Amino acid sequence: MTNIVTTKTATSKTAGQVIVDILERFGVDRLFCVPGESFLPVLDALQDSAIDTVLTRHEGGAAMMAEADGKMTKRPGVALVTRGPGASNASSGVHVAQQDSTPMVLLVGQIARDMKGRDAFQEVDYQAFFGGMAKLVIEIDDADQLPALMVKAWKTAQEGRPGPVVISLPEDMLYDPVHHSSLSPVIIEKPMPDESALDQLADMIKAAHSPVIIAGGSCWSDHAITSLETLAITADIPVVCSFRRQRLMNNLSPAYAGDLGLGCNPAILTRIKNSDLVILLGGRMSEIPSQSYSLFDIPHPQMRFVHIHRDQNELGRVYTPILSIASIEDAVIDGLLARMDTVAETPRINKAHADFLDWTTPIPEQPGQVNMSKVVAWMRDHLPPESIMTNGAGNYATWLHRFYYFRDSGSQLAPTSGSMGYGVPAAVAASLRYPDRPVIAFAGDGCFQMTMPELATAYQAGAKPIICVIDNGMYGTIRMHQERHFPGRGQLTSLVNPDFVKLAESMGCIAYYVDHDAAFPDAMTAALTADRPVLIHIRIDPESITPAMSLSQITEQAKQA
């Protein structure tokens, strides 16, 4: 610990005060925090600020809430955590932001400058620790450099492929005066397409017999999303959304073909493999959507492959396109619409959407008394389109992604990083951002217990998320893979769980228990009118592990292989 001598002049603000001032000038209205003694001047300045500072129970929860807030606002979400173990805990949310291309700024306390390099209490080299996850790591040693470096961080988080930036704040620096706090404007460059490239792409579309658009990436504008639907219908091009990006097109649009996720519809894979033109719009086609990099030949895809991304560095990283365009989505879509004539008939999108509707029909029978396909189908039929759905990682999420219809551009918060525990903090952030919209988190029993203390955060902050805990008494995804590779030898996946209803009630929440299909509608209907957080404990049969196969069927199939 360091004894800080505080000095403050009448004409200067401290670095701690200026940080808060700058955040306000950037338009930050909320941040997520676990307090620490390493940034006391910032905490003190927040008392006099209009910024809503949300006290969370764990730094991982704070970082995931900030990431979710960044997804919703399309500007950097902000988390504030202490040094050492606090920063280490927050890294889980930084990783989500990196993989999901979400703008985020993590402010981290740091040891005093004269202690650096001595392996001081809670000392961490943040450049080494976060360097592989963050777009930029900055340590501010000179208080007078603070305004310029904050602008650099804010710009970096949003420009090109968005992502997380980490700012390290030595605790003694925060007491120093800042003599000049003027800010340069934060100008985010928006790359535009070359007109000749748009001409070339329009000609390819007109000549194609079986084109497909794959929509992915982050920070799409509402205009781009609605214009993409118009383009798809105008030119009769089915649109497939990338992994956990279903929000990029109204799932009930006639042009929507489904998503490239885990347990993907085989009809989508066939359609893409048989296409003569694939347009990857905004996405990167990483491991999950590419089906472990098996969907396209590497480096040269077997069909004409066009890649459009706002970050030049992402073009051609894995696949070599015949045409690459560094541009924001809006400009490309608008440019193509100006070059397209409306087709007389739309057989391609009609067939693709019919395949999607068939794929999302609830499965008549599942092991046990709760059929999750019917539970999710009830939600899609009864929840308003603006409802926000969140989830973490686990087989339980397959039910949501297959059987729910995302109909609003802001209706989905899901980590492409596959991070367990994300659903609850994301739901807290969503409920605070949109208090008048239903917010429903899906979480497996294992996933939920990664961040379940954030239920207390929700109650204290006045958020009203509905948390559906899908409880099969195990880490289901790991158990499924164990049975596939080592049939009959599952281990370390069974969970002895707490009483989730009593647990939620102890945190100020309302809670319901569901152990058969008929009980769910009443529980959800009551939850939608509650004035506080609600937990719905849904007990499912461990055999109901996927929509396609039971756990025992997976085991038997593996034994016969």
Image (spheres, rainbow, N blue to C red):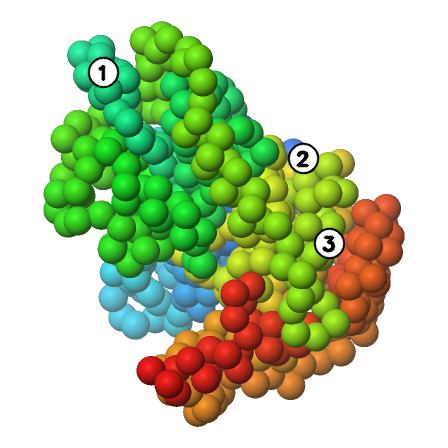
Instruction: Give the mark toward the camera: 2 or 1.
Output: 1
Residue for badge 1: 203
- In screen coordinates, is 287 left or right of 373? left
| In the depicted structure, whether residue 379 falls above or below residue 60 | above
Residue for badge 2: 386
Q: Which mark is residue 85?
A: none
Determine whether the residue tagged by mark 1 lies in a helix, strand or loop.
helix
Q: Earlier in the sequence, mark 2 or mark 3?
A: 2
Mark 1 is on which residue type? Asp
Q: Quadrant of the C terminus?
A: bottom left
Mark 3 is on which residue type? Ile
Mark 2 is on which residue type? Glu
Q: Could you give the CA–CA distance between mark 2 and mark 1, rounded to whole angstroms?
A: 37 Å
Residue for badge 3: 466
Q: Quadrant of residue 132?
A: bottom left
Tell me if mark 1 has few (under 14), some (14-19) or many (20+) residues whose alpha carbon lies within 10 angstroms of its own.
some
For the view shown, which residue lies furthest in the bottom direction? Answer: 489
Q: Earlier in the sequence, mark 2 or mark 1?
A: 1
Q: Observer-nearest residue: 338 or 233?
A: 233
Q: Could you give the CA–CA distance between mark 1 and mark 3, rounded to whole angstroms?
A: 48 Å
